[in-house]
């Protein structure tokens, strides 16, 4: 407990230094954060979202699970709350995903509109330190999640099911979702932005693992059942020249698995967080990708509790991943990702 408190203080101070120094060095930060139904699943969740953004002061925030409950505009509400705390952000109304920017927004666009809760992608254009940036937010289709099938749970109903017998069967189930459809539209629009001189950043909850995380080295870990899988969405992004910021900085999935889901949350019993209670479903499904001349990821840290849920139990991390621990209440069942970017 004492060691944990020391680590928490160290990480808090590290975050303070990171936030305070970036404007002097021409850096900017992006926070990807699934906020679990606008923070409504946890008492004090909305207030915790506000408090954490005030603490971190990210230049851009890519949000997942923006619901606009009761005909409200969630990002407008969030902007008003942040303004009361002395922070000005820009945004626009969106459904399912959301974007916040500390820099004026030049343009906004719906890339993949929400339909039947199959995910969404939005984009804004702005500038950071005098350089043109297009920032995208994605929350991809949660159905046909084939990585659950590998673990013996149907990826749409989450009922027990037979484990697939081949990689081909896994990928066939995976592309039955609309995740690949959405990301192809993103890639096409991002190419247009790049042609106009924009660097591109994509943050999102993809609801799909990375091909860089299901490798020969860990095929018998985390209930992978011996499979090495070239997962569709991250493969498409890699082929289009996009860089996975976390895996670029921490290329070894054995030492730095980078799990973002399911995150522990002390306000909830483990059974209220897991979808595969008899399995180890820990995955890295929240990402920040980027592409652009001179743009590079300089630092990345997992934002949230160090514990995850596996086999319906709270499990402490034994990896070398670094965690930026919450101030107090953690509002979600995901961990976030905070990445610092700079220009070469």
Image: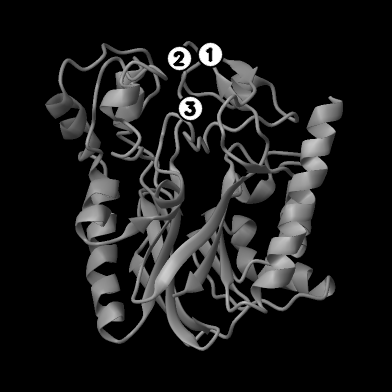
Residue 328 visible in the picture: no
Q: Residue at x 28, y 39 (%)?
A: 211
Q: Residue at x 51, y 67 (%)?
A: 341
Badge 2 crowding class, 10 Å Cα cut-off, few under 14, some 14 to 19, many 20 or more, is some
Q: Secondary structure at mark 1?
A: loop
From what the image shows, is residue 224 above or below residue 192?
above
Q: Position of residue 64 (x, y in %)?
A: 52, 53
Residue 82 visible in the picture: yes
Q: Earlier in the sequence, mark 3 or mark 1?
A: 3
Badge 1 crowding class, 10 Å Cα cut-off, few under 14, some 14 to 19, many 20 or more, is some
Callout 2–callout 3 Cβ contact below 8 Å: no
Pointer 1: what residue? 311
Q: Nearer the viewer, residue 114 or 122?
A: 122
Q: Residue at x 31, y 30 (%)?
A: 214
Query: Label 3 vs label 1: CA separation?
Result: 10 Å
Query: Label 1 vs label 2: CA separation?
Result: 5 Å
Pointer 3: what residue? 282
Q: Nearer the viewer, residue 14 or 56?
A: 14
Q: Quadrant of the N terminus?
A: top right
Callout 1–callout 2 Cβ contact below 8 Å: yes
250 with respect to 243 (left or right):
right
Pointer 2: what residue? 279
Q: Quadrant of the C terminus?
A: bottom left
């Amino acid at each position: 407990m004492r060691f944990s408190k020391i680590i928490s203080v160290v990480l808090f101070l590290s975050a303070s230094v990171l936030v305070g120094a970036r404007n002097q060095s021409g850096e900017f930060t992006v926070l990807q954060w699934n906020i679990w139904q606008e923070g409504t699943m946890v008492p004090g969740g909305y207030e915790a979202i506000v408090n954490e953004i005030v603490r971190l002061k990210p230049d851009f925030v890519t949000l997942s699970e923006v619901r606009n409950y009761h005909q409200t505009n969630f990002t407008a509400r969030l902007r008003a709350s942040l303004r009361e705390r002395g922070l000005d952000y820009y945004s626009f109304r969106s459904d399912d995903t959301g974007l916040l920017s500390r820099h004026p927004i030049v343009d906004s666009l719906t890339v993949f509109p929400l339909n039947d809760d199959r995910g969404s992608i939005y984009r804004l254009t702005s500038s950071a330190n005098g350089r043109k940036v297009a920032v995208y937010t994605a929350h991809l289709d949660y159905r046909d999640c084939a990585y659950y099938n590998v673990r013996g749970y149907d990826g749409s109903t989450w009922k027990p099911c037979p484990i697939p017998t081949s990689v081909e069967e896994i990928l066939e189930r995976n592309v039955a979702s609309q995740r690949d459809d959405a990301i192809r539209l993103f890639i096409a629009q991002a190419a247009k932005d790049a042609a106009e001189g924009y660097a591109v950043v994509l943050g999102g909850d993809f609801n799909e693992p990375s091909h860089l995380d299901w490798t020969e080295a860990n095929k018998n870990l985390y209930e992978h059942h011996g499979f090495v899988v070239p997962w569709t969405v991250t493969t498409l992004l890699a082929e289009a020249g996009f860089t996975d910021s976390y895996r670029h900085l921490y290329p070894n999935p054995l030492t730095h698995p980078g799990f973002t889901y399911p995150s522990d949350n002390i306000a909830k019993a483990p059974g209220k967080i897991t979808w595969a209670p008899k399995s180890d479903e820990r995955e890295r499904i929240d990402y920040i990708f980027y592409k652009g001349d001179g743009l590079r990821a300089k630092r990345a840290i997992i934002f949230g509790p160090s514990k995850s849920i596996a086999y319906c139990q709270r499990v402490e991390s034994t990896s070398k991943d670094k965690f930026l621990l919450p101030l107090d209440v953690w509002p979600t069942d995901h961990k976030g990702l905070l990445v610092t970017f700079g220009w070469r």
